[in-house]
Image (cartoon, grey):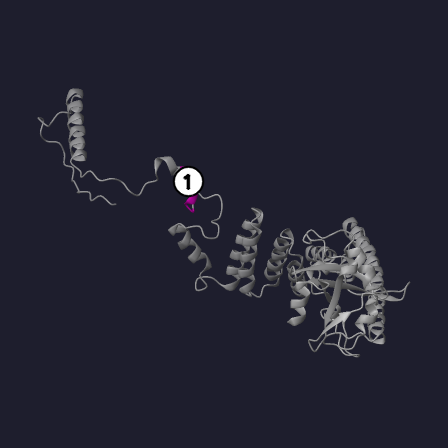
Amino acid sequence: MTTKKNKIEMEPEINPSAKQPMTDEERLKLAKKLDDELDEYINSLPKTKYEDGWPEDRWEEEMDKHPFFMKEAPKLGDELHPLYEGLQKLKYDPDENEPQELAISYKDDGNFNFKHKNYRLAIVAYTEGIKQKCGDSEIDSSLLNNRAAAHWFLQNYRSCLRDCELALKIKPNYEKVLNRAANCCYHLARYDKGIEYCDNILESDKTNKDILNLRKKCVNALKLKERNDRKRDADNKKANQSVKDLIAEIVSRGYKIEGGGKDNIDLSKLEPCFPELANQRVYLNRETNCLVWPVVLVYPEYKIMDYIKEFADEDSFIEQLHIVFETYPEWDRAKAYRPDNVNIYFETINQNIVKVDNEKTLGYVLKTQGYVIKGGTPNFIVLVKNSDAEKAFLRR
């Protein structure tokens, strides 16, 4: 504000009776009058509440939100101060900044978040900087290196290695990046590539103890991995041969598998479909040269099932019944289910019911005309001889 000054021309004093200076009493009286007039003016102003100030009990909290005083950058989802939004727009407006300036601004933001361990926000900032494609190799490689570092602290080793590889395309001898790439390869079990990165570093720094130690770890891990791979290949080869031998035995013994002919039987058709028999797939006992099957016994009278985990095809049904009914089942209150008091049946592929001779072996019955093994699990129906349940079952 400027104050207009009136021009006063001074003239020689010609009046001997000019006004004398104010006394102290007059000066005090005038000052009091001016104070009273000011108080009267202030009191006459409208009484309105000041709404724009900071609440007394939250002034520190409000101050921290102000862009000029905040100690931390706003987090995702935080409400932004209007001034902060304005500063952001000015800082990141592509119409006001060159790509290089924008890349540097995003890099600074990423560094700020990285310093405060907000690695995910740092990654977002570095990514925006990379998108500017400013063309400056130092800035571009630095952004990639910094984003790789943020991924490293989040243990995103695959993403970290990818950024390292991109940075090395721009700046092949970037030592920090080579070091981080070598460590990523170790964590990702890419030991051969890790050794290669270590060798690149050691070309210019042969005494780097950390890299020498990392290279040694990669070499030892690679040898162990190769040994384990050879063992796994041998085990797979052995397992494949065992499967072939198993299928050959099933075919040679004349057993019929649902959905599989002589030439298209695979393991999926031999896997038990009952959770109670999980991991109990048929296998070939080479010592006895017999096939050992998981078997299901169904009791229609009580609508329950029993599971025999290992039933060798050379064993008879009566032998298994003595094991199954060694003690009376809880549901058999009449104690009618005894090895000598039950009949066993099976249903053929044509839905005919066939009675089993309990003295015969499982292998003998599995070769019976019309019997098909479903879900890798032979199953049979058990009923008390001459019982009402048996008669009703046979009528149906």
Q: Residues within 10 Å of mark 1 (few under 14, many from 20)?
A: few
At a point 14% along the width and 34% down the height, the residue shown is 12
Taking 230 as reference, is 57 above or below it?
above
Q: Residue at x 89, y 66 (%)?
A: 289
Residue 200 falls in which quadrant of the image?
A: bottom right
Residue 254 in view of the camera? yes
Identify residue for label 1: 61
Using the rendered image of the protein, determine whether residue 191 is visible from the camera's viewpoint.
Answer: no
Q: Quadrant of residue 232?
A: bottom right
Residue 384 location, x and y as percent?
Answer: 72, 61
Reply yes or no: does residue 61 show up in magenta.
yes
Q: Main secondary structure of the magenta part?
A: helix
Figure quadrant of the N terminus:
top left
Relative depth, front residue between 250 and 380: 380
Image location (x, y in percent) of residue 44: 15, 36
Q: Residue furthest right?
A: 287
Residue at the image position 61 percent from the left and 53 percent from the top: 150
For this view, does 98 lie left or right of residue 315? left
Q: What's under tag 1, amino acid-wise?
A: Glu
On-image quarter of the C terminus: bottom right
Q: Position of residue 196 (x, y in %)?
A: 78, 61
* Magenta-tinted stretch: 60-67
Q: Quadrant of residue 2?
A: top left
